Every structure is written in C-alpha cells, then in structure tokens.
C-alpha cells in the first residue's frame, strides 16, 4: 500500500475544522465520521489504530460500518476533537418524545 502523504499544518487545521462543523450541524455519522477524523489527523489506518490502541482491521471495519464499537472506543476516537458519544434529536423533532404516527 502506498504511503499516505503527510498533511500540512494548514490542511490538518482545515480538515479538523470541517469535522467539527459537521459534528456541530449533526452531519457527522458513523462510519464516515471515523474516516473523516482519521483523515483530519493525517494518519493512515495503521497509524490511527496504533494511536488509539486498536488493530488496523478494527479501523477498517469501523470505516466500512461492519463493526460494533464499544462506547469506550468511540469516546477514545472522539477525544482529540472534544467529542463524546451521546443521543442526538432527529432534525424536526418536537416535544420530549418522538412522534408516533
């Protein structure tokens, strides 16, 4: 596999900003979120795995959406961005309970 080109400081900053905006607007979804976070850090799957104590296979499965990550794993991945896992209200939801139709 070819080596991934290292991002410049400016590129990393721009990508991190994009990930933060996507999370803030509710547009950051697993599994694409894992790849976007990894890319914004400028890491290969193997580097990302080593940084978070995962295997490369686990990272691949997270990015493909074929894994069932633990809460601990998701919080570790989100930590560099100040993200924590939580419930998010669907867009357009009203009141304290979902509408039953």
Image (cartoon, grey):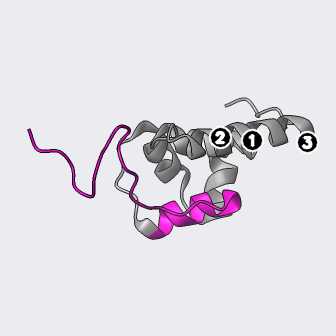
List the single residue furthest toward the left: 101
Q: Mark 1 touching mark 3, by CB under 8 A?
A: no
List the single residue furthest toward the front: 95
Q: What element carries label 2?
A: helix
Q: How far apart are marks 2 and 1 (CA)?
A: 6 Å
Question: Which residue, given by chain and number where applicable, does mark 2 sit on?
Answer: 21
Position of residue 84 in the picture relative to residue 38 (left or right): left
State the residue in front, 60 or 42: 42
Question: Which residue, given by chain and number where applicable, does mark 1 sit on?
Answer: 17
The 10 Å Cα crowd at callout 1, few under 14, some 14 to 19, many 20 or more, is some
Q: What element carries label 1?
A: helix
Q: Residue at the spot x=85%, y=34% of the render?
A: 11
Q: What element carries label 3?
A: helix
User: Disc number at residue 3?
Assistant: none
Q: How far apart are marks 1 and 3 (CA)?
A: 12 Å
Q: Mark 2 touching mark 1, by CB under 8 A?
A: yes
The 10 Å Cα crowd at callout 3, few under 14, some 14 to 19, many 20 or more, is few
Question: Which residue, given by chain and number where applicable, does mark 3 sit on?
Answer: 9
Q: Residue at the spot x=55%, y=50% of the render?
A: 56
Q: Which of marks 3 and 2 is nearer the N terminus?
A: 3
Which residues fall within the magenta stretch?
A: 72-101
State the residue in front, 54 or 15: 15
């Amino acid at each position: 596999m070819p080596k991934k080109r290292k991002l410049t400081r400016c590129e990393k900053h721009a990508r991190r900003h994009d990930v933060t905006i996507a999370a803030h607007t509710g547009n950051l979804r697993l599994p694409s979120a894992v790849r976007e976070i990894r890319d914004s850090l400028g890491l290969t799957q193997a580097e990302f795995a080593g940084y978070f104590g995962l295997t490369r296979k686990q990272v691949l499965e997270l990015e493909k959406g074929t894994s069932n990550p633990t809460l601990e794993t998701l919080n570790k991945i989100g930590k560099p961005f100040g993200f924590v896992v939580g419930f998010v209200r669907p867009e357009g939801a009203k009141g304290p309970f979902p509408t039953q139709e």
